[in-house]
């Protein structure tokens, strides 16, 4: 299986994906293996994702630390907790993609 990086344009933004190409019923079809986001190369994503994950995890800790105990029901603090949860999800997704990308690199796919 060979994979390559495909560029997708969404509005004014460009995003990159690692895809593999296959023929299904005689027609070429691409299967997305990993979304690289704004990183144009696999090496760029492998280099920058660990720092991005650390930054997101730090933001989660800071947001949650700023919410006083028992204040979770106040609107302002709910917004902060929601932002922290969003950052945590993004960090988890990036960790998952980083793991997939490292496995694909180890297997020689990318």
Image: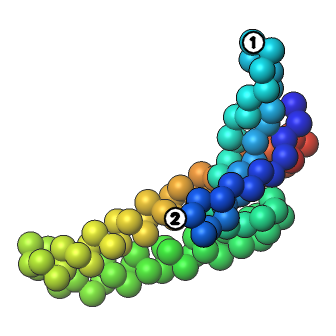
Can residue 51 be seen in the rendering of this structure? yes
- The circle on residue 91 is 2
- Between 49 and 6, the residue placed more toward the observer is 6
Q: Looking at the picture, how far across and down is residue 4, in whole percent?
A: 84, 46
Which residue extends farthest front? Answer: 11
Label 1 SS: loop
> Which residue is depicted at the point 60% across and 69% down?
12
Q: Give the answer, above or below, for where 59 lies relative to 92.
A: below
Q: Quadrant of the N terminus?
A: top right
Of badges 2 and 1, nearer the viewer stands 1
Which residue extends farthest top? Answer: 25
- Callout 1: few (<14), some (14-19), or many (20+) C-alpha neighbours within 10 Å? few
Q: Looking at the picture, how far across and down is residue 38, in whole percent?
A: 67, 67
Say which quarter of the image contains residue 66. Answer: bottom left
Horizontal relation, residue 50 to residue 86: left or right: right
Cβ atoms under marks 2 and 1 closer than 8 Å: no
Horizontal relation, residue 52 to residue 102: left or right: left
> Which residue is depicted at the point 84% across and 41% down?
3
Specify which label sits upstream in the sequence, 2 or 1.
Answer: 1
Would you name the residue on which mark 1 appears? 25
Q: Looking at the picture, how far across and down is residue 13, in whole percent?
A: 62, 68
């Amino acid at each position: 299986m060979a994979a390559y990086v495909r560029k997708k344009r969404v509005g004014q933004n460009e995003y990159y994906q690692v895809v593999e190409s296959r023929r299904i019923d005689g027609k070429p079809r691409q299967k997305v293996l990993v979304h690289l986001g704004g990183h144009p190369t696999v090496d760029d994503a492998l280099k920058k994702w660990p720092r991005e994950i650390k930054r997101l995890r730090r933001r989660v800790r800071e947001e949650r630390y700023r919410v006083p105990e028992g204040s979770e029901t106040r609107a302002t603090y709910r917004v902060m907790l929601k932002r922290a949860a969003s950052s945590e999800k993004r960090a988890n997704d990036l960790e998952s993609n980083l793991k997939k990308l490292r496995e694909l690199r180890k297997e020689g796919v990318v």
